[in-house]
């Protein structure tokens, strides 16, 4: 039955299973890859709610707009190292692109 669901609904089922364990920290690795706009919106609302409940959220994504809009703190990795760390409200997509490709600010 799960295979018949859309990518977004499959993602929701997987997250629902994780939430049953009542973990304090949740890791999301490219959670919106292959899902539609509605499912992304639902997922962002869920993650925001979990964070407001005090859950720790680790959110890994190459979608910079998601990171800027969702994260309190952003760490940028390049070549296996953290090359930048900033508060989400200070970040821009341009900054994230620069750091994630090995660049440094002018």
Image: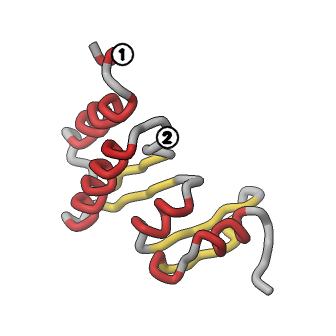
In front of the other: 79 or 99 = 99
Residue 63 image-quadrant placement? bottom right
- Label 1, label 2: how many angstroms apart (C-alpha)? 16 Å
Q: Position of residue 95 (x, y in %)?
A: 65, 75
Q: Which residue is mark 1?
A: 3
Residue 33's x, y, as percent?
49, 40
Quarter of image, res 54: bottom left
- Using the image, determine if residue 106 lies above or below residue 26: below
Under tag 2, what secondary structure? loop
Residue at (30%, 39%) from the top-left corner? 15
Q: Which residue is mark 2?
A: 33
Q: Residue at x 76, y 83 (%)?
A: 105
For residue 51, which numbered disc appears in the image? none
Figure quadrant of the C terminus: bottom right
Q: Residue at x 23, y 43 (%)?
A: 19
Q: Are marks 1 and 2 in contact (CB under 8 Å)?
A: no
Expressed as whole percent of the image width and height from the top left, the position of residue 45 reads 26, 56
């Amino acid at each position: 039955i799960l295979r018949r669901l859309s990518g977004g609904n499959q993602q929701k089922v997987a997250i629902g299973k994780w939430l049953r364990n009542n973990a304090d920290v949740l890791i999301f690795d490219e959670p919106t890859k292959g899902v539609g706009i509605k499912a992304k919106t639902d997922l962002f609302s869920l993650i925001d709610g979990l964070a407001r409940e005090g859950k720790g959220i680790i959110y890994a994504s190459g979608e910079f707009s998601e990171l800027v809009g969702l994260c309190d703190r952003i760490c940028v990795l390049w070549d296996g190292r953290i090359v930048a760390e900033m508060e989400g409200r200070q970040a821009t997509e341009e900054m994230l692109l620069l750091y994630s490709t090995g660049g440094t600010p002018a």
